[in-house]
Image (spheres, helix red, strand yellow):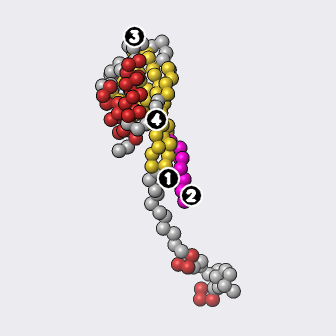
């Protein structure tokens, strides 16, 4: 299950609209989810896992007491396997805006290996102008 789907599933019980990055709906109570990640564990010179730095933004009218919803969101995210969320109040005079910050470790899918032509099978460089290709001597074989 993707990170976004896990967050959506965890917060579905709150009953508010949930979107990723930008909310374009009409509800006065909604949740916006965002995340970034950074490579965390390495093996064979490649990342194995990434630490996902997640934020859930709870938006509501100023007169709405968001504390119970905030606690329900924190508990739901924690129960879904995320770290316990830190809280920041980013409200302004027009709306309540609570930011919950939490983390998760997600696997990094290995890249498809790039097939490289072995040096022994690499195409020969063209012979210098005016020289017969059969007489061309590769570097280091003289």
- In primary-sequence order, the first of circles 1 and 4 is 1
Q: Is residue 39 magenta?
A: yes
Residue depicted at 43% across the width and 29% down the height: 56
Residue 16 x, y percent position in the rendering: 32, 25
The residue pinned by badge 2 equals 45
Badge nearest the viewer, 3 or 1: 1
- In primary-sequence order, the first of circles 2 and 4 is 2
Residue 124 x, y percent position in the rendering: 57, 79
The residue pinned by badge 4 equals 83
Q: Is residue 133 above or below residue 33?
A: below
Badge nearest the viewer, 2 or 4: 4
- In primary-sequence order, the first of circles 3 and 1 is 1
Q: Is residue 93 above or below residue 123?
A: above
Figure disc tally: 4
Residue 58 x, y percent position in the rendering: 41, 24
Q: Residues under labels 1 and 2: Cα distance?
A: 9 Å
Q: Residues under labels 3 and 1: Cα distance?
A: 46 Å
The residue pinned by badge 1 equals 48
The residue pinned by badge 3 equals 63
Residue depicted at 50% across the width and 20% down the height: 89
User: For mark 2, does the 10 Å Cα neighbourhood hold few (<14), some (14 to 19), or many (20 or more) residues?
Assistant: few
- In primary-sequence order, the first of circles 2 and 3 is 2
Q: Residues under labels 2 and 3: Cα distance?
A: 52 Å
Q: Residues under labels 3 and 4: Cα distance?
A: 29 Å
Q: Is residue 102 above or below residue 114?
A: above
């Amino acid at each position: 299950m993707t990170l976004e789907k896990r967050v959506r599933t965890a917060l579905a019980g709150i009953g508010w609209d949930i979107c990723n990055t930008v909310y374009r709906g009409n509800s006065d109570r909604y949740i916006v989810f965002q995340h970034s990640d950074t490579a965390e564990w390495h093996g064979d010179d490649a990342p194995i896992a990434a630490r996902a730095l997640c934020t859930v933004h709870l938006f509501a009218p100023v007169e709405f007491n968001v504390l119970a919803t905030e606690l329900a969101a924190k508990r739901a995210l924690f129960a879904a396997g995320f770290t316990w969320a830190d809280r920041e109040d980013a409200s302004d005079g027009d709306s309540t805006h609570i930011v919950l910050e939490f983390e998760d470790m997600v696997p990094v899918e290995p890249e498809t290996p790039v097939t490289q032509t072995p040096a022994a099978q690499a195409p020969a460089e063209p012979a210098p102008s005016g020289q017969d290709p059969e007489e061309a001597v590769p570097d280091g074989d003289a």
